[in-house]
Amino acid sequence: MPEFIYPDWSAPKNVRAVTTARTGGVSRGPYGSLNLGDHVGDDPEAVRRNRALLRAALKLPSEPLWLRQVHGTNVVDGAAAETGATADGAWTGKPGVVLAVLTADCLPVFLCDRQGTKVALLHAGWRGLAAGVIEAGVRALGIPGENLSAWLGPAIGPQSYEVGDDVRNAFLGADPEAAQAFAPGAAGRWLADMYALARQRLGALGVREVYGGGHCTLREAGRFFSHRRDGTCGRMASLIWLE
């Protein structure tokens, strides 16, 4: 049986959201066992069976909108886009449309409005986060940040994500306050806090209700896939939809 992580946030009851753990599927080897990514070298039949398990366990109202993620800022209308669309986020105001992003260290960002009329889901690696995928997601919703809630799903934690000057400079060039999200690491490198960087971006947009950010996909090896830890590995899925 798949294990799920449910957001602890102030979303209305008709907003359904979840992130998968790595357990409860049929994939083997480095993809063991609930790999939901079809682009990482796993047996396609195993991925198909895992996605069927996911749909059945959650009683999903439709097949999730699986995107071709490229660490960019494109956010599509989930009700109009097709599976395989090149994007790193989607939004919808239509009940029954299941949005999805795949991660294995990157940050899934969940958004909803307080009335439960619209939701969005974003894939935020450092490149997308620095380039403005969160800003693009809020723009796509067309709702003031003050009326939104956010949940930050499982990602690589601040004690594990070692980066170089290029990553730090990409954020500081846009906002000097981003320096607070970087701590000195080994050999002149930096430890980046993706959760803090996302909170800064959300705060600048007026989003005050920001929850989550307590996991580390690298350190929680039994629970999550981690590309930084393992290289070849599976992907977790984050899902959101309106009932």
Image (cartoon, rainbow, N blue to C red):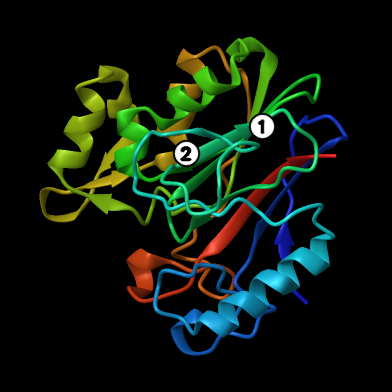
Asked whether 125 or 90 is in front, the reply is 90
Asked whether 242 or 22 is in front, the reply is 242
Determine which quarter of the picture holds residue 53: bottom right
Identify the residue position indicated by label 2 in the image.
195
Instruction: Judge from the rendering whether residue 24 lies leftward or rightward of residue 90; answer left or right.
Output: right
Asked whether 218 or 92 is in front, the reply is 92
**Amino acid found under the numbered disc labelled 2:** Tyr
Identify the residue position indicated by label 1 in the image.
92
Q: 9 above or below 139?
A: below
Can you give x and y, in whole percent of width and height, for residue 199 in the image? 49, 28
Q: 1 above or below 140?
A: below
Residue found at x 48% / y 33%:
75
Instruction: Judge from the rendering whether residue 1 lies leftward or rightward of residue 181; answer left or right.
Output: right
Q: 211 above or below 5?
A: above
Asked whether 195 or 92 is in front, the reply is 92
| Comparing labels 2 and 1, the label whose residue is closer to the camera | 1
Q: Secondary structure at mark 1?
A: strand
Q: 26 above or below 59?
A: below
Answer whether residue 27 is visible to the viewer in this image.
yes
The label number, if any, that marks residue 234 in the structure image: none
Can you give x and y, in whole percent of width and height, for residue 137 in the image? 51, 27
Residue found at x 78% / y 31%:
11
Instruction: Judge from the rendering whether residue 129 lies leftward or rightward of residue 162; answer left or right.
Output: right
Residue found at x 80% / y 25%:
116
